[in-house]
Image (spheres, rainbow, N blue to C red):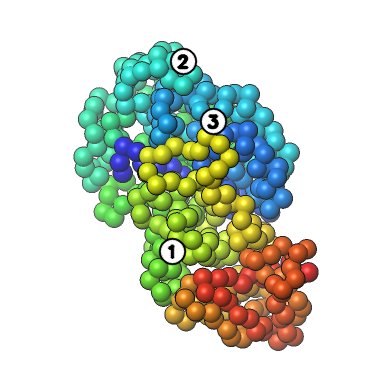
Amino acid sequence: MTKRLICASTAAVLAAGGITAATAWPSQATPPGEKTVTATLFEKPYADVGKECKDTLGPAGYGYVEVSPASEHIKGDQWWTSYQPVSYKIAGRLGDADAFKSMVSACHEAGVKVIADAVINHMAADSGTGTGGTEYSKYEYPGTYGDSDFHACRKDISDYGNRENVQTCELVSLSDLDTGSDKVRSTIAEYLDGLKEMGVDGFRIDAAKHMSADDVKAVKGKMADPGFWVSEVIHGEGEAVQPEEYTGIGDVDEFRYGKHLKSAFQGGDVGGLKNIAEGKLGSAQARTFVDNWDTERNGSTLTYKDGDLYKLANAFMLAHPYGSPNVFSGYEWSDKDSGPPSGGDGWTDMHAQQAITGMVGFHNAVGDAELTDWWSEGSALSFGRAGKGFVALNAGDAETKRTFSTSLPAGTYCNVAKAAPDKCDGNTVKVGDDGKAEATVPAKGVVALHVGAKP
């Protein structure tokens, strides 16, 4: 992890108010309700997020949108300035408190719940004036924290095999809050409760790995109503801190998932994806994603720059029953430090593309239906979802044509990876009485059928 790559995480767990720090919260990767897919609109201004909820996310069937940090932060054009808070005022570059509240209302009206990215492990690395006018120095934040509220280890983390070093020293020189302090815990809980009062439904806890699980649990226990909760805990082989430690608090981002997808889809043998859950968090605890803003920059996962192969991986995530899917939608970049576009151009709008929105509908339609009829050969695979859906994916350079076992009832279905059911001319597949269908899956292409999409 570098100074510019400060990690993140999201998913969903509902907890009742009035709980104590000793409480273990139930974890579930699929949030309550029928719409369980999250879209992360990275660094999108709040006014634009509200519009996206109305125009795209709601109609497509997304249940949740994750938004970038709202707190006042250091000045600068780079994306990572959002991850160096200087106060808990809603005064960042993405919008003020009014813009934030308007976004939440617009999203709720569209049937989309809001997950806020919360940076609570640390404050800033230097001194200056924040985006909301707050004067600060590295260990002094007027009205929020003073020198005694930070850990005594004032040097960078140097040994990921040492728990104390990871959780009390500084993540790339960022002032590390003493989250074992009751005062610090109460201050953080008050900030998060304030976001809840503005309508937020849940939280992604940034850099949770760098706080003990007991500290994170204690903060949550101080809140009046924690809502949904997910911790960002990057897995590292042989490291002292592991993702499994945080599953009693809420869901956890499963970073191994995206790495597995990259290996399978770029390696030309996708058969092993049938058992993608092996060696990872339980499905009821994992939030899955193809990439996020950290991994797209460090090369550990596929990214939008991989074109159709990237969309293919997202289609698999949305079709397969493991975990709770989170679709990442950011912006184009060549400089890894580049902040978001200042205008309307430059966004990938991945969340709004038919190859993705069609699969969000697929995910909603198949629900928890069992995986059936698995087939794979080389770079192609297919599987059914117990009479509710069928998907075939081809990561190869040549088309795949064959007769597939779909498990679907007889009928004509729309390939939702290519077209919406009401505009499906030329994109239909017929399933026979025996549940079989002859179909051609183009190179780097997808055929996806479900019972809710018949033209």
What's the residue type where badge 1 is placed? Leu
Whether residue 189 is visible here, answered yes or no, is: no
In front: mark 1 or mark 3?
A: 3
User: Which residue is drawn at the image coordinates 38% and 66% (left, top)?
Assistant: 263
Mark 3–mark 2 CB contact (< 8 Å): no
Dot 1: few (<14), some (14–19), or many (≥20) neighbours within 10 Å? many
Residue under label 1: 261
**Residue 179 vertical position relative to residue 292 in the rendered view, above or below:** above
Q: CA distance from mark 1 to mark 2?
A: 43 Å
User: Which residue is drawn at the image coordinates 39% and 47% (left, top)?
Assistant: 334
User: Which residue is drawn at the image coordinates 40% and 17% (left, top)?
Assistant: 129
Residue under label 2: 133
Mark 1–mark 3 CB contact (< 8 Å): no
Residue under label 3: 94
Tell me: 430 left or right of 215: right
Q: Which mark is residue 34?
A: none
Query: Could you tell which of marks 3 and 2 lies nearer the N-terminus?
Result: 3
Tell me: 33 left or right of 445: right
In front: mark 1 or mark 2?
A: 2
Question: Residue 377, percent across and down?
Answer: 47, 81
